[in-house]
Amino acid sequence: MQKVWFTVLILVYLDFSVRVGTVPVCAYGPAGCKVPSLADLFERVIQQSSRMHGMSSDLHSEFEQSLSPNKNLIGKRRCHTYAIRTPDDKENAQRLGREQLTEVILKLLEAWNDPLSHLYWSLSQDQNQDFSYYSPSKALEITDMVQELRDGVEKMAQKMKLEGVTGNTVGSISPESLVPSFAVSFYKRGGLDSVDHHDLLYCFRRDSNKVKNYLHILKCTTLPGLVC
């Protein structure tokens, strides 16, 4: 009987330990939640952006490897986000204020919502058997990652406001304010071909790398005591 009670106590303890170890992390600290620091939020979004860029690079490489050597894929290469003014190097990014750099990051993430959704739909309809069977699911996963990362950056921006690191100039971003109307209608019409797939994957790899680098720079210019 003592062995039975001892086993029960162990199970109760393990269950309690698991519950304590998985306490949800909340941005504003309601009861029962751990309040993350600004450094925690930065670390989280930087890790997410690194995973997102890694997956975008893998998908782009995978697509290029699926093409026959004699297939010429010289597309427009004018990414739909060209209208978003982005710093072209680390020095220029550091010259931007924290509010401006945060807004650039949010604009880039928001601008990819519709294109990635249409990329997923188009890849799922594609008959190119050389392209990986798992590519549509990867495109869908990237779409979800962009949404999660945008939500994370918005929470981080709110935390920066609450701590007085930034002002109140970073507001909500609407897709219509980011890209020209013809670019939005282009992705909404559907029927993307191989050149469109290649250009989208190329552009997203480029923009995801920008987001990753800008988040690193924003962290370095926001948190004290960092050597960047």
Image (spheres, grey):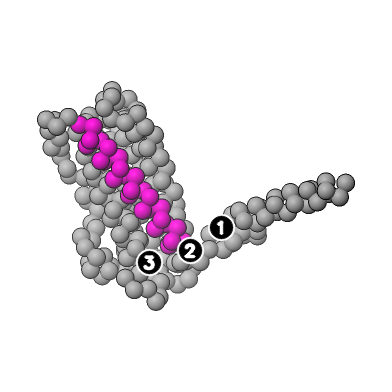
Of residue 5 and residue 131, the one placed in the foreground of this image is 5
Label 1 residue SS: loop
The residue beneath circle 2 is 40
Mark positioned earlier in the residue sequence (1 or 2): 1
Residue count near mark 1 (Cα–Cα under 10 Å), binned few <14, some 14–19, many ≥20: some
Label 2 residue SS: helix
In the displayed structure, would residue 189 be above or below residue 56? above
Q: Are marks 3 and 1 in contact (CB under 8 Å)?
A: no
Q: Amino acid at mark 2?
A: Asp
Q: Are marks 1 and 2 in contact (CB under 8 Å)?
A: no
Q: CA distance from mark 3 to mark 1?
A: 20 Å
Q: Amino acid at mark 1?
A: Cys
In the displayed structure, would residue 26 be above or below residue 58? below
**Residue 201 point in image, percent of width and height:** 26, 41
Residue count near mark 3 (Cα–Cα under 10 Å), binned few <14, some 14–19, many ≥20: many
Residue range in magenta is 40-67
Q: At x 37% / y 73%, what residue is drawn? A: 226
Give the label on residue 26, or none: 1
**Residue 188 point in image, percent of width and height:** 30, 33
Q: At x 36% / y 53%, what residue is drawn? A: 50
Q: At x 27% / y 50%, what residue is drawn? A: 207
**Residue 160 point in image, percent of width and height:** 44, 67
Q: Amino acid at mark 3?
A: Lys
Give the label on residue 219, or none: 3
Compared across the picture, whether 62 is left or right of 33 comes to: left
Label 3 residue SS: helix
Q: Main secondary structure of the magenta part?
A: helix
Q: Is residue 94 visible?
A: yes
Mark positioned earlier in the residue sequence (3 or 1): 1
